[in-house]
Amino acid sequence: MTHTRDVIFPAGRQDLYQRNRYSPAIRSNGFLFVSGQVGSRPDGTHEPDLPSQIRLAFQNLNDILKAAGCSFMDVIDVTVFMVDPEKHFEAAWPVVLENWGDAPHPTLTGIGVTWLYGFQFEIKVIARLPS
């Protein structure tokens, strides 16, 4: 049995994803599985300032969620990756919370990493798609 992936592409970034050979999000069985989003500009380069990078990562995430017909309020599970969280957490977390929304909040797993291809922050989510 062949399964075709139901891929969601945000407007204007399909070439970037095809060049890097991965899908930004896949819709399956009422859920949306979103690849990790970083603070990349439309050409794929990174935003150097950490708070701006986090805001742009959320913008990129929200563009994908919107393309699938949902929003961050539909997110049920979040994984955050941060380079050197001991050094950057205090500056980063208030910016994350600007985008977090009201309770009830999604589940969260935070992972400290040593490298994110020039980025400092990445966010990956699973969302329940509206009926």
Image (tube, rainbow, N blue to C red):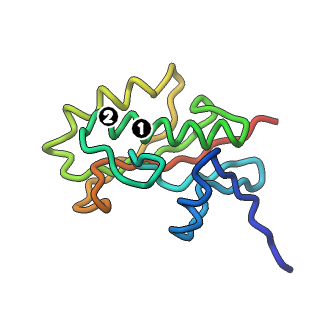
Q: Looking at the image, is 22 positioned above or below residue 14?
A: below
Does 63 sit left or right of 7 as displayed? Answer: left
Q: State which quarter of the image contains the N terminus.
A: bottom right
The crowd level at tag 1 (other Cα within 10 Å; few <14, some 14-19, many 20+) is some
**Residue 22 image point, x, y percent:** 57, 66
Residue extending furthest toward the left:
87
Residue, x 15% and y 45% (percent of image)? 86
Residue extending furthest toward the top:
102
In contact (CB < 8 Å): disc 1 and disc 2? yes
Mark 1 secondary-structure assignment: helix
Q: Circle 1 is placed at which residue position?
A: 56
Q: Circle 2 is placed at which residue position?
A: 52
Q: What residue type is labelled 1?
A: Leu
Mark 2 secondary-structure assignment: helix
Does 74 sit left or right of 112 as displayed? Answer: right
Q: What residue type is labelled 2?
A: Ser
Does 81 sit left or right of 64 as displayed? Answer: left
